[in-house]
Amino acid sequence: MKIKHSLFTRREFLNGLLGGWLGALAATVLYPVIKFVFPPTIEPDKVMLLISDYKDMESGAVKPFAWGAKPGYIKKKEDGSYKAFVGVCTHLDCTVSYKEDQKKFFCACHDGWYDEYGKNIAGPPPKPLRQLRADVEGDNLVVKKEGVA
Amino acid sequence: MKAKNIGRSLKAWFEERLGLSAVMNFLGKKTVPQNKHTIWSYTGSAILLFFGIQVVTGIMLAFYYRPTLEEANKSVARIMTEVPLGWIIRSVHFWSASAMIVTVFVHLFSIWMIKSYRKPRELTWMTGVLLLVASLVFGFTGYLLPWDDLSLSATKVGTDIPRSIPIVGEWVTKFLRGGDDVTGDTLTRFFSFHICILPLFLLFLLAVHIYLIQKQGMSVPLSVEAGKEKLAELPFWPNFIYREIIVWLVLFGALITVAVFLPPSLGKAADLMAPAPKGIKPEWYFLFLFQTLKLFPGKILFINGDTIAVFLIVAALVLFFFLPFLDNKPDKLKGKVITWLAWAAIVYAVGMSIWSLLT
Amino acid sequence: MKKRTACFLPLVLIIGVFSAFAATIQQPAPKEKDKSIQAPAQQPPAKDKAVQAQAQPEKIFAAPQNIKERTAVYVFVAWLWAAIFVLVYILRLEIKEADRLLELKFYRDGKK
């Protein structure tokens, strides 16, 4: 279907082309800049700990460990197996502490409470603490993400 | 409301308060003289391009660089290996530094040859010389930051040179090094110079330099002024700016290509106690000075050879700074001699640099 | 035609001097590549220090780590130059037009 007059002038077309391609070049240059400035967060796939550090834990006790750059907690369950949590509060990322006497995790920032299984029970945290698997393999206590083989 | 209307009312709002339209109108009328020397007027903005690239890549590198003795080398290694595309950013920063300094020298010599520093542009020249010094100091301070063997040695030699100046020499060296020797303090000091003091200094000088150029307009070379033809002028916007963008694009492409295929390496962390490695050389833009210093014998008539060399270099720099006043009769023989001196300087600098590279 | 080719002279000069020094200063192509440090397993602190003490490589060469990255770099550079060539072409058209308007004294009245 033919139209009587152009939708834009030749000048507009050329200027549009120039602007568009300058934009494409800018995007090309911006891409590595963005990649550089937002590096991927490196969370380990697994962390190997020495079982000797955790062997003598009492049942129900909780001990801290380093999950990459984040704080973590190892808990020894009643049946002797281990459970791990990422000790980062699900509210606004403060590091939680463990209250021995009350058997609860506590976040001092905004008064958040989690029970001994990491479930959020009081205060602002919207979700339970992130769970990790902790299995004994030989001399090591290997902490992995949930669902990873 | 249509976007155009919103745009218009926003513009009017700012105009009422800032009154920038006067500036815009002035810039809109800017012209560039068109003659056989016009091509050299692209060098100034090319410097700006490379400097802009330095600022951006420099800021990005400063996100990950750690300016302490223990971590400097490691952090650069991390940038090169762990940070996504860090090696490209570092490479661009490295090559753009050299590109900027090459362009500064080309710009400088072209101005010298066509004598754009004649009245009333003396201040523009003088701020330009200071800008050259600032660029070289940028290069010198930046060179130490990776803190590897070569850069440590080069800095040791470089900061030792002012010592040969009588009376103030010791103080200058102490100021540069943050003590008697090159230590971790030197590194943090150089870092502070490189990202804070020098940028402020350079930006101030640049503002003066560019203001003067806008206010006084682009100069017309002597040969054209005296000449018969009508002085042809090209409007800056849009004719000249389109040409300038082409130059920028090609230079940018060349820079990125070189940076991607020839990235700089990193030596292992410097050991302050280790003996100097073989073949210490400063960066290429200092080679001719380095070679000049080497030429002078240890002692000439009871005076330290180095002292004389440094004196001569400083004297040359001072004469250089006051060139517009020395060249007060540009069309006479004196003027021609000064132009010839420019060629002599180029030959000297290039010759000395090549000699330094070969030995 | 002469003017147009002469326009590239300072460009060629800058690039020429630039590459001359690049050729004389740069090292030959890197032989060893530094391995990427992706640590999936974390050793307890005592072991860590032992590992660090031994191998600090003599020189680190920067380069893309694998074939995928290398190809990405080539594609990036190729695309960059393609965009630049297109832009130079468009800009030459713009310059022709702007110069034509200049001839017509179009800008004399302050119009754009």
Image (cartoon, coloured by chain):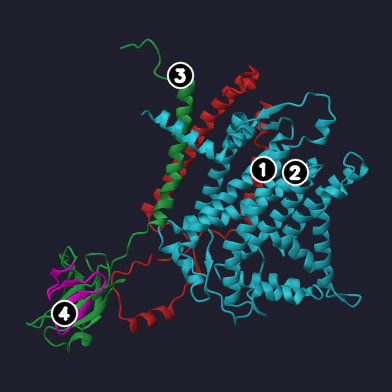
Chain colours: A green, B cyan, C red
Is the residue at mark 3 from the same chain as the one at mark 2?
no
Residue A18, horizontal then vertical, whole percent: 48, 31
Residue C73, horizontal then vertical, whole percent: 43, 49
| Residue C25 in view here | no
Whether pointer 4 and pointer 1 mark residues with C-beta atoms closer than 8 Å, the reply is: no
Whether pointer 2 and pointer 1 mark residues with C-beta atoms closer than 8 Å, the reply is: yes
CA gap, disc 4 to disc 3? Answer: 72 Å
Return the residue at label 2.
Answer: B110
**Image position of B113 with respect to C30: above or below:** above
Return the residue at label 4.
Answer: A75
Residue B196's tag is none
Whether pointer 4 and pointer 3 mark residues with C-beta atoms closer than 8 Å, the reply is: no
- Quarter of the picture holding the C terminus of chain B: bottom right
CA gap, disc 3 to disc 2? Answer: 42 Å
Return the residue at label 3.
Answer: A9
Q: Chain of mark 2?
A: B
Residue B43's tag is 1
Q: First in sequence, mark 4 or 3: give its number.
A: 3
